[in-house]
Amino acid sequence: MDRKILGIQQRIDALEAKAQTAPVGSDPELQAQLARFLCVLSSGLIEQALIVVLEHYAKRKSQDRVGQFVSHYLSRIQNAKFKDILVTVGRFDPEWREHFETTTDDEVKDAIDSIVNNRNQIAHGVQVGISLATFSGYYKSVKRFIVDLETFVNSH
């Protein structure tokens, strides 16, 4: 796994573990605040994973100028819900879109969309009701998708 992606995941993993085992576990409001923060970090993880994996592919498969163009294009990705991920990978190859559309579990698709939706609401000051347990389920699905994305793209 790419170091940048791994670093973000390790940061989230460590904070999630602290939130579950620290004395904050006895304070549901503090635990919910941590879950909200973890949603924001995880949304960034989704974006960065998509960007990094596709940038590496472009740099591996094309000339430097094309790789730079792709990097510039990908740097504009924000709040990538599952449909946005499909559009982006489909621009590389329509068969890639088809692959992820058909092989990604609905649970994973919903988890990605829920994390991004929660992140957007949090960023706009809305008090979302996500628990640490709910976040943890979403996050496991997101990590599974990132592994699938990286494995698939690296095999092409």
Image: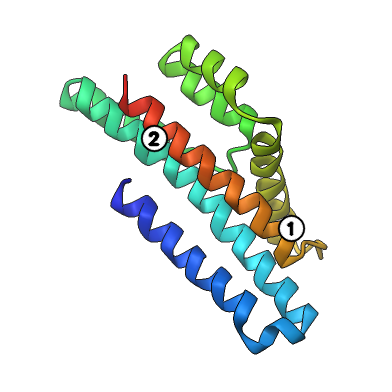
Q: Position of residue 45 (x, y in %)?
A: 49, 51
Amino acid of disc 2: Glu
Quarter holding residue 38: bottom right
Distance from the alpha carbon under mark 2 to that under mark 1? 25 Å
**Label placed on residue 150:** 2
Q: Position of residue 84 (x, y in %)?
A: 59, 30
Front residue of this view, candidates 145 and 90: 145
Residue drawn at x 39%, y 35% is 150
Q: With 112 as the anchor, is 124 left or right in this view?
A: right
Q: With 138 as the anchor, is 149 left or right in this view?
A: left
Whether residues under marks 2 and 1 lie with C-beta atoms below 8 angstroms apart, the answer is no
Residue drawn at x 59%, y 43% is 79
Q: With 46 as the anchor, is 1 left or right in this view?
A: left
Q: Position of residue 124 (x, y in %)?
A: 73, 59
Residue drawn at x 72%, y 46% is 114
Residue located beneath label 1 in the image: 134
Q: Position of residue 16 (x, y in %)?
A: 57, 69
| Image: 19 above or below 126 | below
| Image: 113 above or below 5 | above
